[in-house]
Amino acid sequence: MTPGRDPKRKIFLVATEESGDRLGAALMKVLRQRLGDGVQFEGVGGRTMAREGLASLFPIEELSIVGFAAVVQQLPKILRLIRQTTDAVIEAAPDALVIIDSPDFTHRVARRVRARNPHVPIVDYVSPSVWAWRPGRARAMLSYVDHVLGLMPFEPEEYRKLRGPPCSYVGHPLIEQLSSLRPNAEEQKRRDGEPPVLLVLPGSRRSEIRHHLDVFGAALGRLQATGQRFELVLPTMSHLEPTVREGIASWPVKPRIVVGEAERRAAFRIARAALSKSGTVTLELALSGIPMVTAYRVGAIEAFILRRAIRVSSVILANLVIGREVIPEFLQEDCTPEKLAEALTEVLTDTPLRKQQVEAFAQLDAIMSTGNKPPSVLAADIVLATMRKGRRAN
């Protein structure tokens, strides 16, 4: 080591889903800008983090598991990967551990790391949904998380109420992508034109797609039978395209399938309305100014568990951020072709429901603002501050 210079900072990141991989890559980029050659990254991540220089311990595709039954079947492998990741963190003895989303995996790693080496500062990037279910998790996190980076503006107050670790709102990555979500003048003409473009978004995982495609297809058939004209567009990713094409084979109205992120965003910019599964995509649609109808179906076991656990009036992320239930949601037995078709008619035409959503979505920029700093910069500031605090404590 050169005299008078700090040793290289080592940061261990764990992200096991594509959305977390994108967050991790943006964070790595800012940390490298701040620390230059004085930072070394290790951990678990996907293709985007790999482009920023991370050699992942294992491919994150090994953890693309959805549904309670699937998790039970894969439990031995999941536990092995948790142990492998924990051992790697302990061996690396990093200046900070950043766990990114996927709490069922990452929090198990964090708890084990804290038990084996209490001196490693731990930052949780993306809060688990403690405000929606299992609120006791917030207080439990005090023992193994030093700081939470919240993507939603209401999360810091929730952590204060629930007596969890310090939480800072750093902003959702979507607020850095508004230009790719909103139409230019030409695209606005198409959004206002006829027939209206209707997006259908059945999910980003195979299990979600299979749960939603049949009922979505039947609803769209009913909508068409009422005489409502629309151009149907279904965005998906290349690895899901075969599943989607198989699922829509029996649909009475065939969508135009677009593949890849660029094509997906182009479809958002011309869409008049959407039929979507619940999730982060509802916030993406709202920021795009697209009125929507949302639905969600899960297996019987998951439904039984969630009904007893959920403590919020809406599971729609955009509703929670806005603070009002402006987006209709049809869950489980309410997710029927009849109800979806009736609601879609309202968001495709000039109705009070459509107007209410458009007006509410216009408030999101102010609600979600982070000032003049992008989320990745705010997140990096807190990671570095937590590292410095950890070094002083040691």
Image: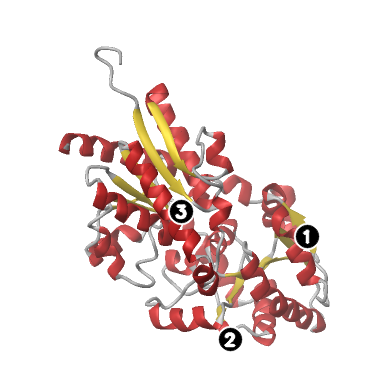
Viewer-nearest residue: 347 or 258: 258
Viewport quadrant of the N terminus: top left
Q: Amino acid at mark 3?
A: Leu
Q: Which residue is mark 2?
A: 334
In the picture, measured across the screen, residue 9 lies left or right of residue 341, that is left
For marks 2 and 1, the one nearer the N-term is 1
Q: How many neighbours does mark 1 have within 10 angstroms: few (below 14), some (14-19), or many (20 or more)?
A: some
Asked which secondary structure carries label 2, the reply is: helix
| Distance (Cα) linking label 1 and label 3 | 36 Å
Q: How many neighbours does mark 2 have within 10 angstroms: few (below 14), some (14-19), or many (20 or more)?
A: some
Q: Which residue is mark 3?
A: 81
Viewer-nearest residue: 234 or 32: 32
Determine which quarter of the picture holds residue 277. bottom right
In the picture, measured across the screen, residue 391 lies left or right of residue 371, that is left
Q: Which residue is mark 1?
A: 257
Determine which quarter of the picture holds residue 216. bottom right
Viewer-nearest residue: 129 or 155: 129
Residue 122's disc number = none
User: Could you say where residue 200 lies in the image, as x and y percent from the top left?
Assistant: 69, 67
Q: Amino acid at mark 2?
A: Asp
Determine which quarter of the picture holds residue 242. bottom right
Relative to 39, say whether 135 is above or below: below
In the picture, measured across the screen, residue 237 lies left or right of residue 335, that is right
